[in-house]
Image (cartoon, rainbow, N blue to C red):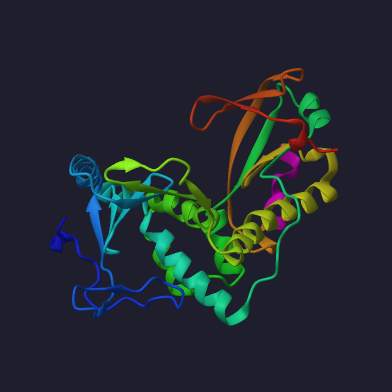
Amino acid sequence: MKPLKQYQTRRKPLKVADDAPIFRNAKGIPYTPQKFIVTEEEMAKMEAEMKKFKSSYTLIISGNVRTIINSKGHSWTGINLRENSKNGYHLCTLVRKEVEKYVEINGVAPYTKPYREQLFNVPAIKNNIGKPLIAVDIRNCYWRTLILKGFISQKLYLQGLRKSEWKVGRNASVGSLAKQECKMQYLNGKLITNTKEFSRPPIALQYVRNTIVGGIYEMFYRLYQEIGDDFVYFLTDCVFVPPHRAEYVRKFLWQEGYQVKMKTVEITQFDEEKQKLFWRDFEKEKDRYYSFSDKQKLP
C-alpha cells in the first residue's frame, strides 16, 4: 500500500534508536521508514484492505489508538482528529517529549510505594450522613503537579491551560506515561496465534507517573493526619470535609502550590455492607455514587 502523502507528518529523516531494525531498498541502500497520521475511518479501511489483500503487518493498540506497521517499516496511526483537537490529546505527545528530556538530564527516583487514588473514612462518613460537606477540588491537579515537580516547562504548562476543554488531555498526558501497549503480528492478512505482546513505556516514565499520582495521595494522607475525622473521603483530586474545615484545607493546599474550587454536597446514603456511598452534588443538581473496596478504606 502506498504511503498517504497528504497525511505525512515528517519530511526530515527520523532519529532512529541504536537498536532499531535497519531497512534497505531493492538496491541495498538503508532508508528511514516514514510515519503517517490518518483518520480513524481511513485506518479502518486500511486494516480491511490489508486483510483482503493478504498483507503481512504489525498492529499496535494503545488505548483507542491503532497503528499499522507494514513490512517495509512504514507506519500509519489512526486518530480521531476532531476529538484529539477538541479534548487536548495532543498534549500527551508534548508532555512525553519534555518528560523524556527531563529524565535524560536529571534522572528520576524510583517510585514503588503503594498509593491509592481514593480514600474513605468510614466512621466519618457515618457521622456525616445528611449533613452538608464541602468538596474542595484542586484545579488542574495533575497538570499543576507536572510543573511543580519540574517535569514540564512553564511554556508547555501555560499552553496546556489555553482551553478548559483540554482538561481531558491534561489528565491523559499523565496516565499515558504508563499506558499499556499491545502488539500483534499478521501474516497474509491473518493474525498469527500467540503473537500478542504487552508492554509499557520505559520504567523511568512510569516512575514519573507514579511520582505525580502517588505524591498527591501522600499529600492528602498528610492532610488526614492533621485533621483526623474531619477528613471524610477523597476522590483523585477532591477532598470532602465539614464546612468549618474548608478554609483550613484551602490554606493547606495553597501552601502545597495548588488553587482550589469549592462546592456544597451532602451524603444521602451509605451502604456499609456493599461499600457504596451516595451523595448529592448541589452545584450540578446531580446524585452521585461510588463503590469502594477494603483497600480504599482508611485504617
Between 123 and 205, the one nearer to me in the picture: 205
Res 2 quadrant in image? bottom left
Q: Which quarter of the rendering shows the C terminus?
A: top right
Between 130 and 189, the one nearer to me in the picture: 189
Res 279 quadrant in image? top right
Residue 178 on the magenta span: no
Please indicate whether residue 170 sits to the left or right of residue 51 in the image. Answer: right
Q: Main secondary structure of the magenta part?
A: helix
**What is the magenta range?**
243-252
Tell me what residue is drawn at x 72 percent, y 23 percent.
Answer: 275
Give the image location of residue 152, x and y in percent. 51, 71
Q: Is residue 77 above or below residue 233?
A: below
Please indicate whether residue 282 sits to the left or right of residue 93 in the image. Answer: right
Please indicate whether residue 145 sits to the left or right of residue 231 in the image. Answer: left
Between 14 and 100, the one nearer to me in the picture: 14
Between 241 and 109, the one nearer to me in the picture: 109
Res 162 quadrant in image? bottom left
Give the image location of residue 246, x and y in percent. 70, 45
Give the image location of residue 140, x and y in percent. 52, 54
Q: Is residue 242 above or below residue 36?
A: above
Look at the image and tell me whether residue 157 can be seen: no
Tell me what residue is drawn at x 24 percent, y 47 percent.
Answer: 43
Tell me what residue is drawn at x 74 percent, y 54 percent.
Answer: 218
Tell me what residue is drawn at x 70 percent, y 63 percent.
Answer: 255
